[in-house]
Image (cartoon, helix red, strand yellow):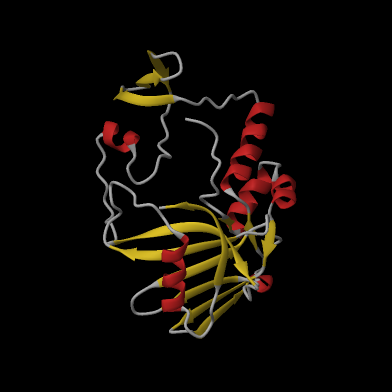
Amino acid sequence: TTRSTFAKALTINSSSLKVIQALGVVDEFLQAGKILTEAEIYFREKRISRINKTYLDSIHNYFLSIPQPETEAIFERKLSRDGVTVQFQKELIGLTQHSTYVSVEICDHQKEITEQAQFDFVIGCDGAHSIVRRLAGFTFEGYDYDMYFIVYDVYFEDSWIKKTTYFIDDTGFVGTFLMSNGYTRLVIRKDGFLPKNKPEIKKEEIQEYLDLHLVNRPLKIKELVRALS
């Protein structure tokens, strides 16, 4: 309904940066993001892998950490320069495929009206529960994992995290990703499927999870900035 305020997606890889460069906005991304060159993977607290992107044969031999709202804002400015306006509070509620075009019904929630329109193409970029896929009659041919992830932006006390790091053991997963604003993105795994009524996320619960899975490499949360499941 509005521009994103939460940094959901965070990391942009080299292949995507090549596309962004072709669009002419890569400098804006580099100014707004944080360049990261290394990632480490631990299993049962023993390092099993180290990724160093500086060895990549590419002009963009790094990860770029940039919050999703920044990404969307840069693309929106680019679209505006090209004469395209991004519209909010509009929802696709009907879709019919014709031989040479697609007709759609769009609910304008701001004006409380339904609009009819025609397009050459409708492109569904609306995620796992895609309304475009459902209206077009396509099935989801993949499968769901019996787990979900909770995302946090936190400040750590005396953090030793200096790079993207994954901690994996037999019962859990912790991922840490540095952000340009000084926060650390923290991702943890929960078994089962995401509850329909998302539970309130508490700092103490996350600290217990970290204490359980990072026994020999403790991380203490100073401040929980925001969370998303």
* Residue at the image position 56 percent from the left and 27 percent from the top: 86
In percent of width and height, residue 128 lies at: 34, 46
Picture coordinates of residue 39 (x, y %)? 58, 72
Residue in view at x 61 percent, y 48 percent: 19
**Residue at x 42% of width, y 28% of height:** 121
Q: Tell me if 153 is positioned left or right of 171 in this view.
A: right
Q: Farthest residue in the front direction? A: 204
User: In the picture shown, does residue 42 fall above or below 207?
Assistant: below
Left or right of residue 24: residue 99: left
Q: Is residue 45 above or below residue 103?
A: below
Between 52 and 184, which is closer to the camera in this rendering?
184
Q: Height in image: 178 above or below 158?
A: above
Q: Tell how many labels.
A: 0
User: Residue 220 location, x and y as percent?
Assistant: 55, 72
* Occupied quadrant, residue 72: top right
Residue 204 at x, y percent in the picture: 45, 65
User: Residue at the spot x=49%, y=80% of the render?
Assistant: 42
Q: Is residue 97 left or right of residue 13?
A: left
The foreground one among 136 and 160 is 160
